[in-house]
Image (cartoon, rainbow, N blue to C red):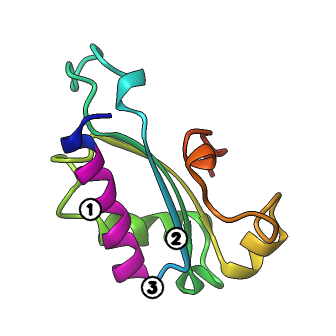
C-alpha cells in the first residue's frame, strides 16, 4: 500500500473512532485485490473494517452498518469504493474469537476478518 493508501486507511479509521466512539477499529486496504474491475480500474478504495462500538448495542446488523455508512458519508463514492465490515458491541467483541486475548498488530491487520 502506498502513502496515499495508508493515509486514506488512517483517515477512515480515525473517523470511525471519533464518530462512533469506537473502542476498537481495524481497517484493511484490500484495493490490491480488486485492480482492474469495472468501476474501480485502479483497484483503489476497497476496504474491510472491524468496528467495535457501544453505539451498536440493541441495533440490528443492518442498522449498525447504516451507522458506519453515515459516519463515512463524506468518504463513500470517493476514497471508499467498497466497504466490507464487521460491527460488534464491546461485549460481543470480548466474546468473539480472540477479542479478549489479542490486541491489533501488524499481523492481524494483514489477515482479513469475516464480514458480517
The crowd level at tag 2 (other Cα within 10 Å; few <14, some 14-19, many 20+) is many
The crowd level at tag 1 (other Cα within 10 Å; few <14, some 14-19, many 20+) is some
- Give the mark nearest the N terminus, 1 or 3: 1
Q: Residue at x 37, y 24 (%)?
A: 32
**Circles 1 and 2: CB atoms closer than 8 Å:** no
Q: Which residue is mark 3?
A: 21
Q: Which residue is mark 2?
A: 64
In this rendering, the answer to whether 28 lies above or below 105 is: above
- Give the mark nearest the N terminus, 2 or 3: 3
Q: Secondary structure at mark 1?
A: helix
In the displayed structure image, the side of residue 62 where residue 44 appears, left or right: left
The crowd level at tag 3 (other Cα within 10 Å; few <14, some 14-19, many 20+) is some
Quadrant position of the N terminus in the picture: top left
For the stretch drawn in magenta, the main secondary structure is: helix
**Circles 2 and 3: CB atoms closer than 8 Å:** no
The percent coordinates of residue 105 (x first, y second) are: 60, 55
Magenta stretch?
6-20
Q: Quadrant of residue 37?
A: top left
Q: Residue at x 59, y 86 (%)?
A: 54
Disc nearest the viewer among 1 and 2:
1
In the displayed structure image, the side of residue 21 where residue 81 appears, left or right: left
The percent coordinates of residue 75 (x first, y second) are: 21, 57
In this rendering, the answer to whether 97 lies above or below 38 is: below
Give the label on residue 11, or none: 1
Amino acid at each position: 500500500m502506498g502513502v496515499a493508501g495508508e493515509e486514506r486507511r488512517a483517515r477512515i479509521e480515525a473517523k470511525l473512532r471519533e464518530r462512533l466512539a469506537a473502542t476498537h477499529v481495524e481497517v484493511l486496504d484490500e484495493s490490491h485485490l480488486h485492480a482492474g474491475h469495472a468501476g474501480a480500474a485502479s483497484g483503489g478504495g476497497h476496504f474491510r473494517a472491524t468496528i467495535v462500538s457501544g453505539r451498536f448495542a440493541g441495533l440490528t446488523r443492518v442498522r449498525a452498518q447504516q451507522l458506519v455508512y453515515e459516519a463515512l458519508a463524506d468518504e463513500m463514492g470517493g476514497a471508499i469504493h467498497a466497504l466490507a465490515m464487521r460491527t460488534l458491541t464491546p461485549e460481543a467483541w470480548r466474546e468473539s474469537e480472540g477479542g479478549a486475548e489479542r490486541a491489533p498488530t501488524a499481523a492481524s491487520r494483514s489477515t482479513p476478518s469475516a464480514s458480517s
